[in-house]
Image: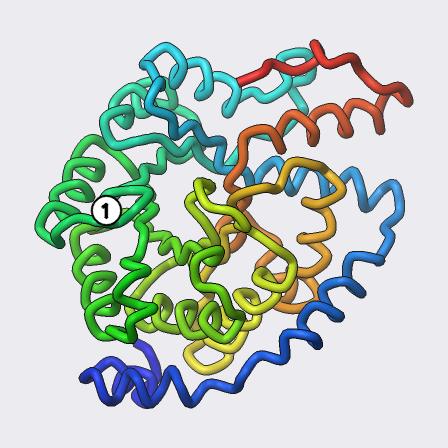
Amino acid sequence: MVASALAEAGRDDASLRRFLHGLPGVDQVGAEARAAALATRSIKTSAKAWAIDMAIRMVDLTTLEGSDTPGKVRSLCGKAVRPDPSDPSAPAVAAVCVYPDMVPFAVQALRGSQVQVASVATAFPSGRAALATKLVDVSDAVAAGAAEIDMVIDRGAFLAGHYLRVFEEIVAVKQACGNAHLKVILETGELVTLDAVRRASWLALLAGGDFIKTSTGKVSPAATPPVALVMLQAVRDFEARTGQVRGVKLAGGIRTTKEAIRYLVMVNEVAGQRWLDPRAFRFGASSLLNDLLQQRHKLSSGAYDGPDYVSID
């Protein structure tokens, strides 16, 4: 159970507003400076090999395009289970993330593997729909076999200060998820300030989100080091007050191994080793996996591969 003081925060609009606006303000200059300092950390080759494999295991391999087909989804699932066909030691990714109507094809393709099926829902990516419509979206995805749901919050309501409306919507979606894990997309590029990111992070955690996620990948900027820093602080502090480990998912704009490893360093330094686990940290990416595989092969072979070493999704 969430600590009683936190449970009281969601009792009514006044209580929630009081709690969220009572959070410590974010020193933007300080956050940017700390994120930049963490990015300068270097790691040894042996640690880099471990970090690359961990990053692969944390990837939610994603296709969220209007042109998605069952064949494309099946192909993506094959890559998720065995990212490098030439090297069976390469780990599988965490999940494949698709639109709700593609969930049955992903479930079929991943049957027997440890890779989870994730589905975006709640009128992704805008979130502009009635709550009843959003809940049907979630229920359909779960009924089709999705083990993880990535929902989007109503950013308009949040920015207008209607915190309780956003809170209650997350609670309703969490209930509709049943046993499926819920990732709450904040769309941080539209929240503008780090103070707003902190408030949205805590709101989502209080409402029962299993993960807080930066972006839909459709808005720029998406994941940035200062934003990741603030979100990691939120889950760390939430765990300190409740004993519950909630996750962070960074999505949007992370394409290189160097970036991924920098974020893993930040995870370790800011949140702690408990978050260096796919159950508590994810990358929402597609092109990132290819770079991770190329860098992995470089470490083992000593030579860079051509662009045809990995499949282009």
Q: Nearer the viewer, residue 236 or 219?
A: 219
The percent position of residue 221, horizontal first and vertical second, equals 55, 50
Residue that appears at 35% across and 72% down: 203
Q: Nearer the viewer, residue 153 or 281?
A: 153
Residue that appears at 42% across and 31% down: 96
The percent position of residue 134, horizontal first and vertical second, equals 17, 47
Quadrant in which residue 31 is drawn:
bottom right
- Residue under pointer 1: 122
Left or right: residue 211 versus residue 290 is left
Left or right: residue 88 versus residue 154 is right
Q: Is residue 63 above or below residue 130?
A: above
The percent position of residue 265, horizontal first and vertical second, equals 73, 57
Query: Which type of secondary structure does the marked residue at label 1 adopt?
Result: loop
For label 1, the crowd category at 10 Å Cα-Cα, with few meaning under 14, some 14 to 19 and many 20 or more, is many
Quadrant in which residue 73 is drawn:
top left
Quadrant in which residue 202 is drawn:
bottom left
